[in-house]
Image (spheres, grey):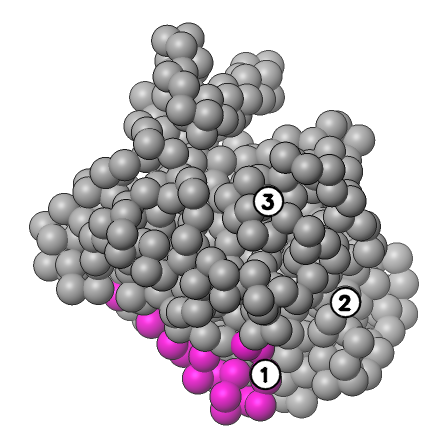
Amino acid sequence: MTAFETPPDLGRSWWLREALAREEFAGPPTPPLDADVAADVVILGGGYTGMWTAWFLKQRDPGIDVVLLEQDICGGGPSGRNGGFCDGWWGGVGDLMATYGQAAAKDLLEACGASPDEIGAFCVEQGIDAWFRKGGDLAVASAPAHEGRWLGTVQKARELGVEDGYHVLTASEVRDRLRSPMFGGGMLIDEGANLHPARLARGLRRVLLERGVRIFEQTPVTRFGFDRPAIAETPGGSVRAGQAVIGLGAWATWWRAFKPSLTVRGSYMVMTAPAPEAIDAIGWRGGESVRDFRSSIHYLRTTPDGRIAFGLGGLQPDLARRIDHRYAYDEGMVRRVAADLYRMFPEFRGVPMEAGWGGPINVAGLNHPFFGTLGPGNVHYGLGYTGNGVGPSHLGGKILAALATGADDPLTRLAVVTCEPKRFPPEPIRSPGMLLANDMIRRKDDLEADGRMPDAATRFVAGLPRRLGFNLGPR
Ligand SMILES: Cc1cc2nc3c(=O)[nH]c(=O)nc-3n(C[C@H](O)[C@H](O)[C@H](O)COP(=O)(O)OP(=O)(O)OC[C@H]3O[C@@H](n4cnc5c(N)ncnc54)[C@H](O)[C@@H]3O)c2cc1C
């Protein structure tokens, strides 16, 4: 590997900076809350979950009075800095069936499977140029050990009768779509799209303001009362509301009610400079969302101006960077991600990285989000997307809007609402145990990438989460 410049820290993700530089996505300022107010529904968190919930509440009842509180700016969290993969749960069909049974799995696949197309249609209807492109979800072997890992998924899809959109690809068929010396065969799922995550988040914000949602940014909720009405206190004022919705992502792990069922990992990304000629050289023209079969996954996609956005999951920066869940820029992490990109695509050596950033992933034990209601029946939550929230948070918004309006809706009978989330072990086992398993999972991935067989101890520890009933880590 030749030397390269470390991807710089631009303070925010490349996506959010690009969006905020345009008036249509920056939008008018929404100052912090500075009074005590009342509302029908108060929403905590201005990510996709909070904003889709506000949208679907207004769809159900245009007159409903909704207040949304965001500690930073809307899209300042993972919703404005993710990879932009916009999928249903098709790639996880096997886990869904094993966890919830065939009928419930089919309901979940259908409900969540509708979201990517609906998000694309929403962007068109609302005039949001969020670069939505449906190029399919391409999962590839990036190490010999990955070969064939997709066969179980295709088999499960067949058992459920939904196999039509799944295609097994030989190494040469993968090469027809894009070339890397690391890639072998793979699987293409037709129902996959990608988009510009921050333009979607900021576009949603604009649409909500137009519908009369009262948004207060730079407004952290410092205290929350589980009562009727629920009370959200902030430094400058409070909101009393009959119903409350919690869409706080990783920050919800600070709440006693959610800590047992949530943990946090980091994911880091880099963005290359535009290099359409290098994209041409690797033959990547179809706009596919590409991921590999590492447990600490590589995910990569192109942009309309010929860049690659490239990420790596399952990373664990030092405690200082984890502590506030901001997962701020980490030089070592983004260098690692950039090195992986150059290794995967030697044609990009010499193409500079324009930015690197990170963000927290809120991980649920079953690898799917969970939704429900707390308190005296008026506090609703949607958490634990486990690195796949762009499409599913749209379904989440529908579910939470139904819960907050007390609607009798099939969505509130989906297994992600009715089943209890899996709990992580208590401390003092939890933190060291999870750190060790995470390290061994990444070590196994890295050894396999070098064509080496992981030793028995590494395999044993990396496989522990699965053996303990979590849908996390390698089988
Ligand atoms: C680097 C990275 C890459 C990813 N790539 C993908 C991908 O390609 N595809 C995919 O599907 N998913 C991806 N994800 C996951 C995806 O971004 C999330 O699942 C999704 O954004 C979750 O949205 P959310 O609204 O639930 O949470 P968030 O976006 O985390 O929103 C929660 C909000 O709550 C706010 N908040 C926290 N505490 C308070 C408080 N006390 N008061 C007020 N507000 C508060 C936060 O500031 C934040 O804005 C990625 C995540 C990361 C970090």
Please tell me whether mark 1 sits on a helix, a strand or a loop.
loop
Q: Which residue is mark 3?
A: 342
Magenta stretch bounds: 110-131
Mark nearer the N terminus (2 vs 3):
2
Q: Which mark is residue 17?
A: 2
User: As drawn, is 285 to the left or to the right of 413?
Assistant: right
- What percent of the width, then of the height, locates residue 239? 75, 66
Badge 2 amino acid: Arg
Residue at image location 50% in from the left, 61% down from the top = 281
**Badge nearest the viewer, 1 or 3:** 3
Mark nearer the N terminus (1 vs 2):
2
- What percent of the width, then of the height, locates residue 118? 41, 78
Query: Can residue 413 be seen?
Result: no
Q: Residue 324, relative to residue 345: is it above or below?
A: above
- What percent of the width, then of the height, locates residue 225? 69, 52
Residue at image location 59% in from the left, 84% down from the top = 128
